[in-house]
Amino acid sequence: MALDLIIRGGSVFDGSGSEPVVTDVGIADGRIAEIGEVEGAAAQVLDAKGLSVAPGFIDIHAHSDYTLLIDPRAVTALKQGVTLEVLGNCGFGCAPIRDAKLAAASIYGYDGSVVLDWTDVGGYLSRLERARPAINVLTLVPNGQLRRHVVGMADRPANEDERRRMSTLLREGLRQGAFGYSTGLEYPVERAVTEDEIVELCTVVAKAGALYATHTRDRDAAAVEGIKEAVRTADRTGVRLQVSHLLPRTTKDRADERAVEVIDGARARGMDIAFDQHTRLFGTTYLNTILPSWAYEGGLGGLAAHLKSQKSRDRMKGYPSIVAHGGWDRVVLLDNTTFPEFSRRSFGDLGRALGNDPHDIAFDILLAEIDQLHRPMVIINAYTPEQQLRTFAHPLCMPGSDATTLAPDGPLADKMFHGAYSWASWYFHFMVKERRVLSSAEAIFRLTGLPARVLNLKDRGAIRIGARADIAIFDAGEFREHATTFEPNQLATGMRHVVVNGRVAVEDGRLTGVRAGEVLRRKYDHEF
């Protein structure tokens, strides 16, 4: 067999958690064709002596739905060995769309530079294919867009007709290639969603044999109850369940341990369940999530009027948002050009310094940014390193970026999303080298074989004959992050070569310009 590429002499991890074997890997037609002492020549040879050779890393929880359209090079992903991302998480995503202006608020990274000129999941995936991403991608159907499409911004449960229409849109999205469905039950557009509504939609997902990924309700004081709701949904429907960024945003009452106990109990009963966790000690989101959905009902003009009205402000202060619900001292404004003097400071500190209610300071920022509500972002300090370590050590936990792909140059050079530059490199360094909780083989399994199993991907996440040739080749001693909280746009180091679908995307640490990623569409072999 004529080979296109040979990877010679590396320590090959197959992605199953087994210890590595020093050997060669031969690649032909985008797939792994030989493993062992590969004789003969190939069009290209990569020297992997002294390096770790692993399946390409899979980001189970990404938000690059839009940024890959702006800059499909996926630099931050490739520089960490990431060859596949799962989009459409947390109820956010790029389809279905009825009203582009309304939909934009549920798309991370949206800046208007790419026109939302599609309406359904199939149209979005086709648009993504035309962009030719450098990595593989697949999507879930986001509930936030289902709600915006059918219910709009009405702050109430969907009625019977609306639930039927959302089920139809969900079914259509799955048939067009989505791998599952996601919710973001803390966000304003989904807060009024009832458990029965989720069950009705998850029944469609379960019949398809697809995945349900959920950003659960109230991840502060009632976080464990939100996880229990997700488990009840899976019990009632039989759906496969992925709990997104499981760790509650509180250090009180053993919440992290109780959350894991709920997962373990469900698994012990036979439920198909797993969870992921991002690699930050804080959450990150838009400041505009402090606004209840009713404030948007009059469009941006109506929202501006509410932000100028003290009566409306007083009413909005009662809304238990994802940002303010746990107190303002832990909420920090990221760099903001309109209010540079407020940047990198907590709203609690700003309130004391200015003699003003932190809520009003936040409203003032949003009013000034009324035409760019996606711009003001905050971090919410929430976790301890000990909580983080215990969570990542659990055998059902896999890491995810919870971020968008970015690049230090090009149209995304001035954009920031914590985790984008650092998540996989931090995870490997922290768990294997710094804390020594996982072996290299175990950490690689969490980055490859485990997410592939959750996604039912039969030919990715593994180095074996016939598998797709998505491969990360790195120096295990040098692979690490350099990003910090306020200087997050620092590329990781130690990733030597990356192969995507058999073609070399990174060689000797430099991007080759090859964009060989595929937009994966799941094919369903039955009616649902």
Image (cartoon, helix red, strand yellow):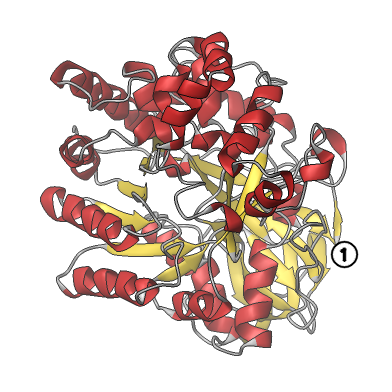
Image x and y of residue 492, in percent:
79, 64
Q: Quadrant of residue 297?
A: top left
Residue 168 vs 135, above or below: the answer is above
What residue is rendered at 72% in x and 44% in y?
A: 354
Image x and y of residue 185, in percent:
35, 42
- Outermost residue toward the front? 355
Asked if one can make out residue 518 in the rendered structure from this viewpoint, the answer is no
Front position in the image: 449 or 387 = 387
Q: Quadrant of residue 131?
A: top right
Front position in the image: 296 or 101 = 296
Q: Report the label total.
A: 1
Front position in the image: 110 or 438 = 110
**Is the residue marked by circle 1 packed among few (<14), some (14-19), or many (20+) residues within 10 Å?**
some
Horizontally, residue 402 falls left or right of residue 406, namely: left
Horizontally, residue 132 falls left or right of residue 296, namely: right
Quadrant assignment for the N terminus: bottom right
Quadrant assignment for the C terminus: top left
Residue, disc 1: 508
Residue 181 vs 393, above or below: the answer is above
Image x and y of residue 273, in percent:
29, 63
Residue 520 vs 486, above or below: the answer is above
Q: Secondary structure at mark 1?
A: loop
Residue 61 vs 184, above or below: the answer is below
What residue is rendered at 33% in x and 49% in y?
A: 217
Front position in the image: 258 or 350 = 350
Hey, what amino acid is under mark 1?
Asp
What residue is rendered at 48% in x and 36% in y?
A: 92
Image x and y of residue 158, in percent:
22, 24
Horizontally, residue 440 falls left or right of residue 269, namely: right
Asked if one can make out residue 383 in the rendered structure from this viewpoint, the answer is yes
Q: Quadrant of residue 63?
A: top right
